Structures are given as C-alpha cells and as structure tokens.
Image (tube, helix red, strand yellow):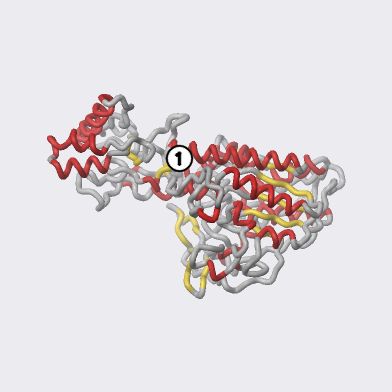
Amino acid sequence: MKMIKNNKWLLLVALTMIACSDDDAVVVNETADGLPLTAGSADFSKYVSLGNSLTAGYSDNALFMEGQANSFPAILASQFALVGGGEFKIPFMNDNVGGLLLGGNLIAGPRLYFNGSGPVPVSEIPSTEVSNVLSGPFNNMGVPGAKSYHLVAPGYGNVAGVALGQSNPYYVRFASSPSATVLGDAVAQNPTFFSLWIGNNDVLGYATSGGAGTNQLGNLNPATYGGNDITDPTVFASVYSTILDGLTAGGAKGVVANIPDVTSVPYFTTVPTNPIPGLPSANATSLNQLFGGINAALAGAGLPARYVTLMADDGNSATVEANPLLIVDESLINISAQITAALTPIYGGPTAAFLGNLFGQTRHASNAMGSRDYIVLTASGIIGTTTTAAPAPFNTVGVSYPMQDSAVLTADETAQVKTATDAFNATIQSLASAKGLAFVDANSLLNQVSNGGITANNFTVTSNFVTGGGFSLDGVHPSPRGYALIANKFFEAINATYGSNFKGVNIGDYRILYPQDSANF
C-alpha cells in the first residue's frame, strides 16, 4: 500500500501565533465590590497549598522557575498578602529549563517551546539535581505526579526510592525528611488557610496511556497499584477525608477543587478520529473488500459491524473526504479465529492467521456522541506512516495497520475514567460542604474552556492546542493565562464562602507561551 505522507495532510493546529504579553503579572489592588479589601472570616497569614503538578505550576511538560511563579497558588498568595497574608515560599527549580538530574544523570527532560511548526524541547541542559535537598518548609507543596494517596505515604520523599519508582523526585527536593509525608509537612506548618487540588492523577495516567493501566475498582490496597491505574473510589474517599481532617484539625479554613474531565484538555481533543484523506482507489477497494468481509462475518454471528466504507480520492481538490482511523479496541470480542478461517481461502494459512491476529479486536474510530474515541496528542506523528511490524500492504498506521491501545482512549475506557471522576468529584464536593470549605468546580470551568471558551479582560481562552491560550504545549497543563483564569475561580469561591472581596487578576497580564530562550523570561 502506498505510504501516506502525514505531514501533508495531518495539520493539527493553525500555526498563526497569537500576540501575548511578556510582562510579569500585575496584582491589582481593587476589590470585587468596590469596598475596602477584606479577608472576611478567613485568616491568610499562613497559607499552604497541596496538590500535584497543577498546584506546582507545571507547564510545557516540565516544572521550571517562571512556571512556578505563575502557579495559581502563587497568584492567590500575591493577593492574600494585601489582607495580612504572610510569605509564600516556593521550592524553586534551579532554572527555567526544567528537567531533573539524579546523581548527574538526566531523569526528566526539559520544557517544550513552540518552534513555529510544533512543540520541541529547548536545547538547554537541566541543572536541577534531585539529591540537593532544599531547606523548608515551603508553602507551595504541589508535587508533580502525585496521586491522592501519595500525600499520606511515608517515604514519598526518600531519594533512595526515586530510581526504583517508589518515591517522587520533586518531593525529595523539599521533604522535611526521607520518611516524611506531604500532609505531615503541611500540617506541621500550622496553616491558617489551605488550598487542595488533588485527584487528577488518580485517573490521568490511565487516560494518557490510552487505558494501558488497570481500573482498580474494588482493590482497596493502593500499594499494589501501578502508575497508570485508576484509583478505587473508596480508597480515594478515605484518603481525601484523611487529608481534610489533617488540614482542618487546627481550625484552618480552605478551598478545594474538583477534578476536570480529562477529555476537556487538548491532549485528547486535538487529533481527530477521522484524519485520513481519500485513499488511492485501489487501496480503498482492497480495504473495503477486506473489512466488508469481516463485517459480513460479524453479522452472521449476530455482532455489530466494526468498519465503515472507506472513501477513495476522487481527484477533486474541492472535495474533502475524511476517513476514520483503524484502532485496536480491547473491549471487543476477539474474532481472530473467525477472521483467519474466512481469509484462509484468499490469502493462504500463514497470511490469514497473521491478519486474524492483527484485526481480531479492531474497528474504525468513532466520533459519535456517547461512543466517541479520543486519539492522544502524542500519536499524531505516526498516523499515515509505515511500520515494520507488518508487511505491505498492511503496514500503514491508522489505515491498514491499527493504532495500538496506547494511542487511543476508547469509548469504553473513557466511560471508566468518567465513572471514577464522577465518584471522586462527589466525594470532594460532599466533604467540602460538610467542613464548610470553599469549593471550586474546576470540572465545569475547563469544560467551558473546551466548549467555546471563556472571555475575560477582552481575551477569550479556549482549549485549542497552541493558539487557544488556555493550555501549555504538553496539552494537559494550563498556560500562565490558564492558571490565572483558574486562580480567579478560586478567588470567586473564597469570596462566596468567607465574605472576602478579592477582584482577581487580569488574565491579559499573563502570557500564553514561554519563549525558547530562558534568558528572555
């Protein structure tokens, strides 16, 4: 089969750059109601923030100094300072390059920048050595990669466990001791006010891996979980309750946020399910015969069709025909044996067996509401290329060779993520209400960003990859402007619950992309 040159037709984003400010964020000493600024019933003198990468200020696939300075807790603290808030210490990285070293060896790469055609890593060398432990305590305790249960896990900051995957290199840098817990280090500071945004990673790793992990529903022992697994909702509820009990034991007030739907971020929405142009006529005919035969066999067994009729290139440049991707779906009944039997008279035994194994759990991707599949952002570069894993003409990725499980979050896997997310969010909102805490509906916020965008300060923030302004180049974490938008939602929730009157920040004062050269920050 003729190789499809994906760089000619898989144009994922408009490359028109949007002008953005390079100025630092400006704190505006104004209030939401025009009255003198007040903290209301809250005491911001000792503010501590707990969470994961979203709290730390992670952006462009890395943690770096400027990103940390633009984190939503740093934005909150800058205005808390106007009503008695104290110092807000951040465990800064060594540079604006990002990335980590362990014993001088690179264990996490540098940040991404936009080179005019796509995201690429900066060429500068990371200088942050994990084993150089900082002197705390620190107010921003966001730990990239942390799941809910990691915040209460002793040894999560032990440098000896990093190489074994048993501890977190970011927490190692500021843990009070190798045996400390994130929650214990936070409580030891006697906070008067806290923010908690945790739980995203309890489903995110499963989603970004294309469902390669395990849904641990019913398994109440998180020590047995893998990095890409979905946390059991009962485990999450127990851990979340423990965290809030610890943070509020001394009378602290606080604000919590729920978990966004992973499918609202550009990592899952940028690559369409049907990016294949009209195929050469001979290729379309042969594939339609093959897939049509499998559909007929499925119908004979009382099973639904798995493939659509592929469109051929009609030679008219004004006509745009889009064909869906061929994907693996492990939730399907495996019909390898049936395919092998049906194709043996046509292709011979060995080839038929190969095709049976190749197509036994495949189908064409769906974009239909309620059964939509999501192609992960990192899969964009392989669509339409050829693979050595199969002979021609069955080697064109996404066309005659299926996109593998890691490249696709199928409809079934999406449903599992949503069920867990809904359960986590019910716990978060219920416990926030029971403890009288401010609550931020981050799920609703990012759904708005994904569906038309949000306009504020004469800027519209959307989830469009690169150009939308809401997300950074990794497609998961917010841009500085996205973090400012999130911070303003936290201000709104704090005002509503505690009677404060913060106005928030002007999101136009925050850039949407960081420059290539770290010296230009």
Residue at image point 74% right, 53% down:
247
Residue placed farthest to the right in the image? 36
Residue at image point 25% right, 31% down:
294
In the image, residue 180 sits, relative to residue 453, either above or below, namely below
**In terms of secondary structure, where does tag 1 sit?**
helix
Q: How many marks?
A: 1
User: Is residue 19 in sight in this rendering?
Assistant: no
Image location (x, y in percent) of residue 409: 43, 42
As drawn, is 39 to the left or to the right of 210? right
If the image is split into quadrants, where does the C terminus sit? Answer: bottom right
User: Is residue 96 in sight in this rendering?
Assistant: yes
Image location (x, y in percent) of residue 377: 44, 47
Q: Which residue is mark 1?
A: 413
Residue at image point 74% right, 59% down:
187
In front here: 290 or 315?
Answer: 290
The image quarter containing residue 345 is: top left
- Amino acid on which the number 1 mark rests in the picture: Glu
Image location (x, y in percent) of residue 257: 66, 45
As drawn, is 53 to the left or to the right of 438? left
Image location (x, y in percent) of residue 165: 50, 63
